[in-house]
Structure formats: structure tokens, C-alpha cells
Image: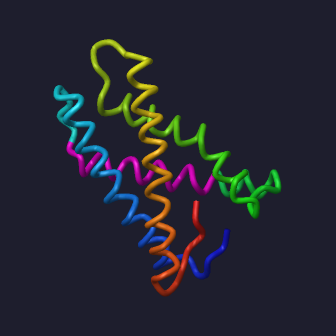
Amino acid sequence: MPAGPASFGLVCFAAVKFAGYTAAATFLKRQFTESTASPWLVGGVRTVLGLAAGFGAVFSAEHFGILRFEAGFYGLLIPIRMCEWLILLALFYRRPEWEWGRSLKFAAFGTLWSYVLDVPAVLAVFTIPGGAWIC
């Protein structure tokens, strides 16, 4: 979904996502008290994962012809975002035993949070000169 030249808009999009993911990491740190990971590090890793997966999702959506169909594109992101959150939980919040139920719950809430963050991130892209390819 093109929204103009990519450079500055992409930085603004990533900055909004980074701030939101760092806030989520602060929440997760309270839930997983044994984790020593910095929320800033977790937010940065989640942002990079999201950008990399987002570019892949745009490529896939274009390949399947759903890039211009927003509901289809955001539907494609559901399993991708679930996997991103599960990876993040495994990297930074794994307990001695992996608890699938709890992990899936946090991944689902994280996926929902990613969609919530899309709103200000996309608004930032359109209100700041430059724009970006949103993913």
C-alpha cells in the first residue's frame, strides 16, 4: 500500500511501533519477573522483527494479489504477528518450562496490540512529509 517516498515515513512508522513495543515489553517484564531483558532491547527486537516480516508480508500479498485488499492484507498478518510474538516470548521471557497456553494468550494480546499500534503508526506516515510503504 504505497503512501509516498519511503525513507522518513518509514522512520516515523518504526518509531511509533518501537515506542508501543517497548511499552508492551514493560508490561511483559511485570508478568515475567525472572526476565532480565531490558524493555528497550525487547522493543527494538520486536520492531526489527516486525519490519522484516512486514516487508515479507507485502511481498507475499503482492504475489497473491491481495496487496490492495486491506482486509486480506491484515488477515495475512494474523499468523505472522502471532509467530513474531511467540518468537519474542521465547527469546526473552521463556521460563524453565514453556507454557503454551500462557504464551499463546500473550501472543494473541501482542498481536492485538500490533494492530492497535497500526493506527497511530499509519497516521504518522500520512501526517509527516514523505510517507512510507506500510506493512
Seen as rendered, the residue at the extreme bottom is: 129
Residue 106 vertical position relative to residue 128 in the rendered view, above or below: above
x, y (%) of residue 77? 61, 46
Q: Residue at x 49, y 76 (%)?
A: 9
Quadrant of residue 58 within the rendered picture:
bottom right
Q: Is residue 62 left or right of residue 41?
A: right
Residue nearest the observer in this picture, 83 or 78? 78
x, y (%) of residue 68? 76, 64
Seen as rendered, the residue at the extreme right is: 65
The colour style of the image is: rainbow
Number of numbered labels in the structure image: 0
Q: Is residue 103 left or right of residue 59?
A: left
Q: Residue at x 22, y 36 (%)?
A: 29
Q: Is residue 63 magenta?
A: no
Residue 68 vertical position relative to residue 30 in the rendered view, above or below: below
Q: Is residue 39 magenta?
A: yes
Q: What segment carries the magenta color?
A: 38-56
In terms of secondary structure, what is the magenta stretch mainly? helix
Q: Residue at x 40, y 59 (%)?
A: 17
x, y (%) of residue 127? 47, 82
Q: Residue at x 42, y 72 (%)?
A: 12
Quadrant of residue 94 within the rendered picture:
top left
Seen as rendered, the residue at the extreme top is: 97
In the picture, the quarter occupied by the C terminus is: bottom right
